């Protein structure tokens, strides 16, 4: 679909394509196509119909930014550019923002790309130890004894079930 407009291409493929995921009770179908930042089947985020599309995928300890160059639209090997970013999270997000801005890319995709990259980087962080479990190791017997209710009494009630004053 090299010479057709993106609007015409979208009208052709919007209801039937290999990447569409339709389910019951879901108003907007999902899409599994590459370069779709939100995985929603919509014209704005479609990576198939636009000459310029942007994708963010996980890489080893970082993210990989994949974007299409419209100049090489008829040459798929040259059309796709992959840039791997393996820096600190803030620097990675700044570099992603610079890639979108400096290449004069679609500004409507910038926020979606930053959100996806942030979610990927957050998922790659090592799980932090819980404070409660770490502190419970040292003083666990004393804390358990203080928190346990006394025998024969159930939280302020006498053995007969009447409330104490």
Image (tube, grey):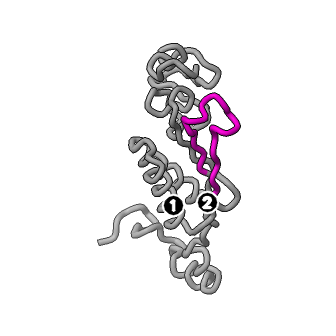
Closer to the N terminus: mark 1 or mark 2? 2
Count of numbered circles on the image = 2
Residue 124 screen position, x and y as percent:
63, 60
Location of the N terminus by quadrant is top right
Q: Dot 1 surroundings within 10 Å: few (below 14), some, or many (20 or more)?
A: some
Seen in the picture, residue 79 relative to 60 is either above or below; the reply is above
Residue 48 screen position, x and y as percent:
57, 28
The residue where tag 2 is placed is: 85
Q: Dot 2 surroundings within 10 Å: few (below 14), some, or many (20 or more)?
A: many
Residue 8 screen position, x and y as percent:
47, 16
Assign a secondary structure to mark 1: helix
| Residue 132 within the segment the image draws in magenta | no
Q: Tell me, yes or no, whether the two marked residues, 1 and 2, touch with CB atoms within 8 Å.
A: yes
Taking the view exactly as shown, the residue that stands out farthest to the left is 165
The residue depicted at 70 percent of the width and 58 percent of the height is: 60
Seen in the picture, residue 90 relative to 44 is either above or below; the reply is below
| Residue 80 within the segment the image draws in magenta | yes
| Residues at marks 1 and 2, CA–CA distance in whole angstroms | 8 Å
The residue depicted at 55 percent of the width and 59 percent of the height is: 122
Name the one closer to the observer, 129 or 94.
Answer: 94
Assign a secondary structure to mark 2: strand
Name the one closer to the observer, 68 or 151.
Answer: 68
The residue where tag 1 is placed is: 95
Give the label on residue 3, or none: none
The residue depicted at 67 percent of the width and 62 percent of the height is: 61
Location of residue 59 by image quarter: bottom right
Residue 159 screen position, x and y as percent:
46, 66
Which span of residues is magenta-colored? 65-84
Location of the C terminus by quadrant is bottom left
In the image, taking residue 104 as reference, residue 68 lies left or right, namely right
């Amino acid at each position: 679909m090299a010479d057709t407009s993106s609007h015409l291409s979208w009208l052709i493929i919007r209801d039937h394509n290999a990447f569409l995921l339709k389910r019951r009770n879901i108003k907007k179908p999902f899409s599994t196509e590459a370069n779709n930042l939100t995985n929603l089947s919509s014209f704005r985020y479609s990576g198939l119909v636009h000459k310029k599309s942007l994708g963010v995928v996980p890489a080893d300890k970082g993210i990989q930014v994949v974007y299409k160059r419209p100049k090489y639209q008829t040459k798929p090997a040259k059309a796709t550019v992959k840039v791997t970013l393996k820096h600190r999270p803030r620097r990675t997000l700044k570099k992603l923002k610079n890639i979108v801005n400096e290449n004069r890319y679609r500004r409507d995709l910038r926020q979606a790309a930053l959100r996806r990259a942030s979610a990927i980087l957050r998922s790659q962080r090592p799980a932090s130890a819980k404070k409660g479990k770490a502190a419970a190791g040292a003083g666990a017997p004393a804390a358990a004894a203080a928190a346990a209710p006394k025998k024969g009494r159930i939280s302020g009630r006498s053995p007969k079930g009447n409330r104490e004053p």
